[in-house]
Image: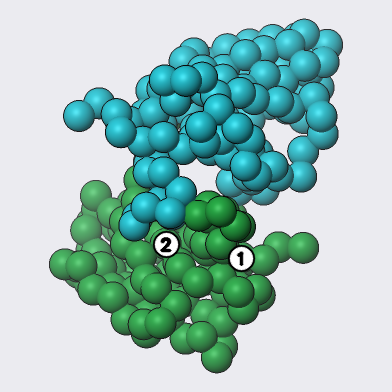
Chain colours: A green, B cyan
Amino acid sequence: DQQVKQNSPSLSVQEGRISILNCDYTNSMFDYFLWYKKYPAEGPTFLISISSIKDKNEDGRFTVFLNKSAKHLSLHIVPSQPGDSAVYFCAASLYSGAGSYQLTFGKGTKLSVIP
Amino acid sequence: KAGVTQTPRYLIKTRGQQVTLSCSPISGHRSVSWYQQTPGQGLQFLFEYFSETQRNKGNFPGRFSGRQFSNSRSEMNVSTLELGDSALYLCASSLAPGTTGANVLTFGAGSRLTVL
């Protein structure tokens, strides 16, 4: 049972335009959501996050939107740059007790920004 | 400060062998988690350690095991390797449970295991 889904395996966008990456989840107990970016031969790096009590968080060119009723979040990158080309993973955090959180990841979306 | 360090970066084993992977967390991070990444399945949670104790375990067979040392360094072991164990094994460290920001993981570059 896949609790975090990224239904688009890949996305191509022209440089300077907006990239929108989507993520759906099924577990309403998730209380924190994160986006990670991964380049080949490197580990995922943390990009941006949002608490379940908010519906938007912005950091420079990156904005994450959360729609709790739809169990959907999205990452907007404006403007897209060639260096943004990477695999983007959506992750959801669930409190697992005694102060611990467990992250569940989607399968990733490969973003290609075309110069 | 130094990032999460994983060794070895690449290794090749044959079926039936066993393998041990090592992870050194970021200084000050006391929790270590392990994930398996395969092309079709994304990142799958293996286990989490804090204070030398396994706190959470994913849905993997008992061939997969791990441990954490008093300096927070961690190792994971896979015994009786199967072809399907070929994957990128990622270690991530985080602040101690209950600390603000403890649910943000910092990943290492991974150990790429190929089983022949």
| Host chain of mark 1 | A
Q: In the image, residue B102 lies at what x, y percent?
A: 40, 51
| Host chain of mark 2 | A
**Quadrant location of the C terminus of chain B in the rendered image:** top right
- The secondary structure type at the circle numbered 2 is strand
Please give the name of the residue rendered at 37% of the width and 71% of the height, measured from the top-left corner.
Answer: A50
Amino acid on which the number 2 mark rests in the picture: Leu
A81 displayed left or right of A113: left
**Mark drawn on residue B61:** none
Q: In the image, residue A15 lies at what x, y percent?
A: 23, 63
Q: Which residue is mark 1?
A: A4
Amino acid on which the number 1 mark rests in the picture: Val
Query: Quick one: A12 or A108, which is closer to the camera?
Result: A108
A61 displayed left or right of A7: left
Pointers 1 and 2 in contact (C-beta within 8 Å):
no
Label 1 environment density (alpha carbons within 10 Å; few <14, some 14–19, many ≥20) = many
Q: Is residue A108 visible?
A: no
User: Dividing the picture into quarters, in which one does residue A94 lie?
Assistant: bottom right
Q: Which residue is mark 2?
A: A34
Q: Residue furthest bottom?
A: A69
Please give the name of the residue rendered at 60% of the width and 57% of the height, measured from the top-left corner.
Answer: A97
Please give the name of the residue rendered at 56% of the width and 62% of the height, measured from the top-left corner.
Answer: A95
- The secondary structure type at the circle numbered 1 is strand
Considering only vertical position in the picture, is A66 above or below B9?
Answer: below
